Amino acid sequence: MKIVSVAGTKNTGKTTLVTLLVSELVKRGYKVGTVKHTHVKLDVEGKDTWKHRKAGAEIVVGAGREETFFIVNKDMGLEKIINSVEQLDEVDFLVLEGYKPASYAKISTSPLDDPFSLAQVDVRELDDESTGKLVDLVEERSFGKLPNMNCGDCGYENCHDLALAMVKGEAKEDLCVMKQMEDVILKVNGNRVPLNPFVNKFIENTFLGMISTLKIKEHGEPKKIELQIQHDK
């Protein structure tokens, strides 16, 4: 999943730009998710979900015929939100609105001194052609979560330097050895823990060997296997 942020000052067309990017990415056949950062409360006072939260519920889920939404009664950090999106669905691109400090590729709608900036645009001047070129840039230079192990196997001193090189078009995401080894994903308290190639393959082979005697064929071809361990003590 690649991530790109739309950042800028208030009333400079961030939401408009997000919708343009999403529409063009979807037109190109990608599955897209969005995350909007806001300084106001999202739930409306007096609504049923608001009453549930007021009563003390930590998580409120609203479910209708065509949509489901979750309200978590706390401020979640961006990385945890990204982890949750990955858990909910498999999307190709995640477009963020806001999150100026994030170390992901950015498109700005106002002057922004940021080494992760791909481009600065005036939304009022965007047409189909210029939007297409912008999405070309997003396809080429945006990237997903890096493991932050700073192993140096990619040829760069750390993950931050690799990320900057990708934004500049000087490197590709497949340079990251750790991201190539994603057959096994380990999360602790919802946070992903990077695995080196040896540990990745060891866990995969050991676990598959252990469950080979279980009745799993009745569930179809095992393309994705999940194991959750509750360790409360």
Image: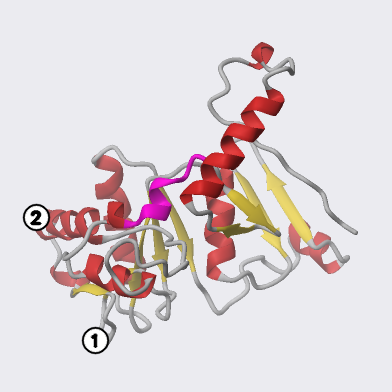
Q: Position of residue 125 (x, y in %)?
A: 13, 69
Whether residue 107 is visible here, answered yes or no, is no
SS of the residue at dot 2? helix
Give residue 210's quadrant in the image: top right
Query: What residue sits 61% from the left and 67% below the top?
Result: 42
The answer to if 123 sits in the magenta stretch is no
Q: Which amino acid type corresponds to the residue marked 2 in the rendered image?
A: Glu
Q: Is residue 174 left or right of residue 207?
A: left
Q: How many marks?
A: 2
Can you say which quadrant of the picture contains the C terminus?
bottom right
Q: Which amino acid type corresponds to the residue marked 1 in the rendered image?
A: Pro
Please say if the residues under marks 2 and 1 sit with CB atoms less than 8 Å apart: no
Sequence-earlier tag: 2 or 1: 1
The answer to if 177 sits in the magenta stretch is yes
SS of the residue at dot 1? loop
Residue 185 position (above or below residue 58): above
Nearest the eye: 143 or 63: 143
Residue position for label 1: 111
Residue 156 position (above or below residue 31): below
Residue position for label 2: 129
The outermost residue toward the left is 129
Query: What residue sits 21% from the left and 62% below the top?
Result: 171
Q: Residues within 10 Å of mark 2 (few under 14, many from 20)?
A: few
Query: What residue sits 66% from the left and 65% below the top?
Result: 43
| Highlighted range, magenta | 176-183
Q: Position of residue 204 (x, y in %)?
A: 58, 36
Query: What residue sits 70% from the left and 62% below the top?
Result: 72
Give residue 12's quadrant in the image: bottom left
Q: Is residue 66 left or right of residue 92?
A: right
Q: Position of residue 189 (x, y in %)?
A: 71, 59
CA separation in Å, label 2 and label 1: 22 Å
Nearest the eye: 100 or 183: 183
